Every structure is written in C-alpha cells, then in structure tokens.
Amino acid sequence: MASALRSSLLRHIQVPVSRTLILNGSNMKAVRSMSSHGDDHLDKEVVINRVLDIVKSFPKVDPSKVSPDVHFQKDLGLDSLDNVEIVMAIEEEFKLEIPDKEADKIDSCTLAIEYVYNHPMAS
C-alpha cells in the first residue's frame, strides 16, 4: 500500500533545483527540473508491450506462456543466468542502467514492468 502511494505521488512531483555557477568570473544560473514522470515519459501499455516482447524473444522461452504476471523461474523455467540476460536486454531496450542490487530483485515481468515504468530515464 505504502509503495503504491509513494509511486503515485512520485509520478506527479517536480522538484526544481537551482544553483549559481561561477564560470570564468561570471555568475550563471543553472536550473534543472526533475520529475519521475514528465510529458515524455513512457506510457504503461508501451512499457508492458516492450517488456513482454523482450521476454518472448528470449531463446529459452515459449512465447505462448508470457504474460504481464509471469515469473521468470517459476513459470518459464529460466535459471538465474537467464534472469540476468533478460534484465540486460531490458536495460538495452530502455537505455537504462539498473544497479545490481535492483536487478537482482527483478524476477518477473511484473517487477520488470514496474521498474521500467517508474524509472525517470526510461526511453
């Protein structure tokens, strides 16, 4: 519940960050707006379809068994190395770098979809 609430709130928060830089003796103002979900953020359906396509195209996977709630090991019979390869394919597809600590937790399409959808840099 708390996780869902947090995700929902983070989708709508923008945090302005302002700093004054001194470059060659002149002050310059740098402003950066950050948002976990800007106007250019991926639609959830797009994320779902792209993640499912990645998993379906994995050589050891029967595409007919792939759904948004499928578990890589329990439902598809993949091992931990296969899991790592799928996460790497997701990183490449969405142009992300998923930290090892987070990548270790992604063991299903559901978790992969949520991670990518909530990542502010996914493209």
Image (cartoon, rainbow, N blue to C red):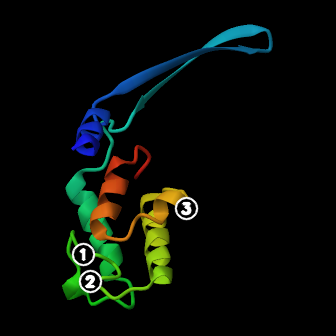
Identify the mark at residue 75; answer none if there is no mark: 2
Which image quarter is the N terminus in?
Answer: top left
Q: Amino acid at mark 3?
A: Asp
Please provide percent x and percent y for residue 78: 39, 86
Q: Amino acid at mark 2?
A: Asp
Quadrant of res 70: bottom left
Kindly identify the residue that appears in the image at 48 percent across and 66 percent down.
Answer: 104
Q: Find numbered disc 1 in the image and state the secondary structure of the residue it sits on.
A: loop
Q: Residues within 10 Å of mark 2 (few under 14, many from 20)?
A: few
Residue annotated with mark 1: 70
> Distance from label 3 to label 1 (Cα)?
21 Å
Task: Describe residue 98's horizontal placement relative to residue 1 as left or right.
Answer: right
Quadrant of res 49: bottom left
Q: Is residue 115 above or below residue 78?
A: above
Q: Earlier in the sequence, mark 1 or mark 2?
A: 1
**In contact (CB < 8 Å): disc 1 and disc 2:** yes
Q: Amino acid at mark 1?
A: Val
Q: Residues within 10 Å of mark 3 (few under 14, many from 20)?
A: few
Q: Earlier in the sequence, mark 3 or mark 1?
A: 1
Q: Is residue 75 above or below residue 35?
A: below
